[in-house]
Image: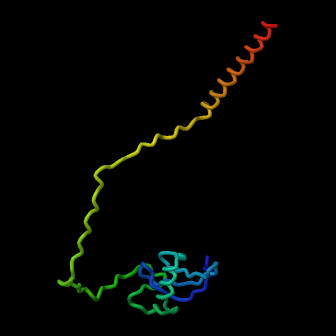
Amino acid sequence: MASKAQVIGEIVCECGRCAYVEQTKRKGDFLQVRCSACGVDQRTGKTIQTRWKNTMQPVGHYHDSKTVAPFGAATVEPVEDTKTDTIEDSPDTPKATPPAPAAKPAITRRETIPPKRETSGAASLFGLGVFVVCAGAVAIGSELMKVTRG
């Protein structure tokens, strides 16, 4: 299915291929990136949206590029790094020392909190049953007392 979003520029995808930057029609007018190998990236975070806007080139900019593979390329040729020199640390730069660990308290006190006991439905019904039997026994006893007295 073809994208309905309008292509407004190109960027270099993380995989090294040329990817199209498209303007979406969703709420917020976000950008999305479409790479032939990686697919569609629709992240809407402020940082990534700003990065895409700032690094976007006009359509066709990477058409004859020797360092960026064209859209739909099957393979990506590695690009040689032209700057292989490393910069040594300056002898005047102080080495970072790790901070000293904080002092531990002499006594550690732990409180034991008893776990809450959950009552099941059967336990509740058992208590209710005992109550009903006792109430019935009291009622029968009072009726017998009335009969014997009167």
Task: Kindly indicate the quadrant of the structure image that contains residue 13.
Answer: bottom left
Task: Kindly indicate the quadrant of the structure image that contains residue 12.
Answer: bottom left
The residue positioned 34% from the left and 82% from the top of the image is: 78
Is residue 99 depicted above or below 91 in this figure? Answer: above
Spot occupied by residue 102 in the image (x, y as percentages of width and height)? 29, 62
Q: Residue furthest right?
A: 150
The residue positioned 24% from the left and 75% from the top of the image is: 96
Q: Is residue 114 visible?
A: yes
Name the side, left or right, on which 126 lies relative to 58.
right
Name the side, left or right, on which 111 lies relative to 56.
left
Is residue 132 depicted above or below 82 in this figure? Answer: above
Name the side, left or right, on which 127 lies relative to 109.
right
Q: How many marks?
A: 0
Name the side, left or right, on which 37 lies relative to 141.
left
Task: Kindly indicate the quadrant of the structure image that contains residue 79.
Answer: bottom left
Spot occupied by residue 27 in the image (x, y as percentages of width and height)? 64, 78
Spot occupied by residue 54 in the image (x, y as percentages of width and height)? 48, 88
Q: Is residue 40 visible?
A: no
The figure's colour scheme reads: rainbow
Q: Quadrant of the N terminus?
A: bottom right
Q: Residue furthest left?
A: 91
Residue toward you, 62 or 44: 44
The residue positioned 43% from the left and 79% from the top of the image is: 14
Residue toward you, 105 or 39: 105
Residue toward you, 76 or 90: 90
Is residue 31 depicted above or below 126 in this figure? Answer: below
Residue toward you, 116 or 10: 116
Spot occupied by residue 39 in the image (x, y as percentages of width and height)? 51, 75
Q: Quadrant of the C terminus?
A: top right
The residue positioned 37% from the left and 46% from the top of the image is: 110
